Every structure is written in structure tokens, then in C-alpha cells.
Image: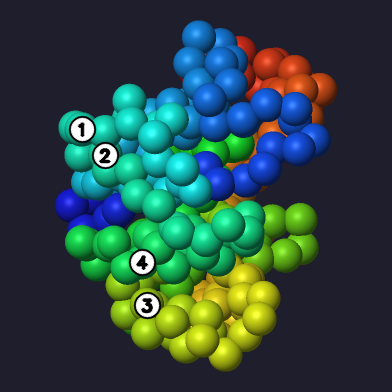
């Protein structure tokens, strides 16, 4: 466990294509949120659940977990990132969404190993940086606030660019997560069903 690292899980999406609140949907005996939280607790000293409405997630409180609100009606993940940075009590923040139940702790470790001298570290996957599987320094808060003040539609990807984030090449990422399980996000029930063989293979390790 890394005492200087907090992990933040965003649960503020609309889940319109999924047809239910993805964060609270049960899969393989646990909610998707609990799967993600379980993967992160071995790496991060603290955990934030960032919600539009914190009430449904009160069951997560305690044991190093805090539920916070981003205070914005729109589902833009930037506001969740900003809220997490403002609530951050450690030097670094790992940001992810609630719909990546196969997230690998080893990916978080690889990002942390590359953070020295950087304001943010992001993995590249599928030819693009992944801002919702990235590491942000507490020092990124100033830039995030500036972006919020001057842009109508700020984004985590834009913040990575502003911070001149260090990018892990795909071949570097594959050393920590060879199959890219950390980037398999769940948009539909069918997508979730397709993760079953990967989950079974992971259980067998």
C-alpha cells in the first residue's frame, strides 16, 4: 500500500446505455464499484468515491473510504477529477471510473514508478492517452482550477495536455497489464457479459 496515494472512483455517469446505475450493479457477487475499490485498496492508502448524489454510496464509507460530491449536474468527468483533487489529502491521486471491474493494481504501480518529476502520468492504450486511468499530482489542482475558470467544457484529457503529462507507451503498459484489462470499460450489459472469460482467467491466477 502506498501511503502517499489516494484513488478516486467516479460514479457520476448517467449509465444511459447500460439501463441501470452501473456503479451499484451486481456482477459476480459484488457491485461494479466494489470490484474497482477492491483492486485499488492494495495500492492506495485512501479511497474517494466521487458521486453526484452521495446518499446511495454511504455503505462505502469507513475503512479509509470517503464519499464526496462533485457538486455539478452535468456528467463531465472533469468535475469529478476537480472535486477529488480538492479533497486530496495525499500527494498523488489515481483517477478511474466505476465501470472497469478488471482494473489491475499492477497498472497503478507502473504509473507510480514513473511519477518522479511529473505532474501527471497517463497510460497510452489503443493509440491514445487514458485520462480515466491516470495519476495526478496534488500540484495539478492549480491548473485544474484555471481550466475550470476559463473553459466552458474542460476535460481530463485537456488537463493532461496542460500538465505535459508523462505518457507510458503501450509496450510499457503491457508489462503491467498485458491484456489491457484495466481499460475494458462496461457500456452495456453485453459488454459486461463479454468480460466473464477474462474474469475467470484472472481468478485462476
Residue beneath label 3, please? 141
Give the numbered dot on residue 65. Answer: 2
Asked whether the beta carbons under mark 4 and mark 1 sit within 8 Å of each other, the answer is no
Above or below, comparing residue 96 to residue 153 in the picture: above
| Front residue of this view, candidates 203 and 134 | 134
In the rendered structure, the answer to whether residue 18 lies left or right of residue 151 reads: right
Q: Secondary structure at mark 1?
A: loop
| Distance CA(mark 3)–CA(mark 1) | 25 Å
Question: Residue visible at 58% across and 57% down?
Answer: 73
Residue beneath label 4, please? 85
Question: Residue visible at 76% across and 56% down?
Answer: 126
- For residue 196, what is the image quadrant? top right
Task: Assess disc 4: are there few (<14), some (14-19) or many (≥20) residues with their C-alpha within 10 Å of its C-alpha.
Answer: many
- For residue 186, what is the image quadrant? top right
Marked residue nearer the N-terminal end (3 or 2): 2
Question: Residue visible at 46% across and 79% down?
Answer: 144
Counting from the top left corner in percent of width and height, residue 90 is at: 22, 62
Residue beneath label 1, please? 62
Asked whether the beta carbons under mark 3 and mark 2 sit within 8 Å of each other, the answer is no
| Distance CA(mark 2)–CA(mark 1) | 5 Å
Task: Assess disc 3: are there few (<14), some (14-19) or many (≥20) residues with their C-alpha within 10 Å of its C-alpha.
Answer: some
Asked whether the beta carbons under mark 4 and mark 2 sit within 8 Å of each other, the answer is no
Amino acid at each position: 500500500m502506498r501511503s502517499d496515494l489516494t484513488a478516486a472512483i467516479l460514479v457520476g455517469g448517467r449509465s444511459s446505455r447500460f439501463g441501470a446505475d452501473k456503479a451499484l450493479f451486481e456482477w459476480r457477487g459484488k457491485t461494479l464499484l466494489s470490484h474497482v475499490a477492491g483492486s485499488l485498496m492494495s495500492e492506495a492508502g485512501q479511497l474517494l468515491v466521487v458521486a453526484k448524489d452521495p446518499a446511495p454510496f454511504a455503505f462505502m464509507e469507513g475503512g479509509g473510504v470517503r464519499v464526496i460530491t462533485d457538486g455539478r449536474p452535468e456528467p463531465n468527468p472533469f468535475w469529478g477529477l476537480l472535486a477529488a483533487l480538492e479533497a486530496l489529502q495525499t500527494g498523488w491521486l489515481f483517477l478511474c471510473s466505476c465501470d472497469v471491474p478488471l482494473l489491475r493494481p499492477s497498472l497503478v504501480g507502473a504509473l507510480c514508478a514513473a511519477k518522479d518529476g511529473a505532474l501527471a502520468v497517463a497510460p497510452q492504450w489503443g493509440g491514445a492517452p487514458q485520462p480515466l486511468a491516470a495519476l495526478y499530482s496534488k500540484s495539478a489542482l492549480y491548473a485544474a482550477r484555471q481550466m475550470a475558470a476559463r473553459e466552458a467544457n474542460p476535460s481530463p484529457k485537456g488537463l493532461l495536455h496542460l500538465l505535459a503529462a508523462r505518457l507510458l507507451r503501450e509496450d510499457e503498459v503491457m508489462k503491467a497489464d498485458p491484456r489491457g484489462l484495466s481499460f475494458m470499460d462496461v457500456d452495456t450489459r453485453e459488454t459486461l457479459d463479454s468480460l466473464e472469460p477474462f474474469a475467470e482467467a484472472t481468478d485462476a491466477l
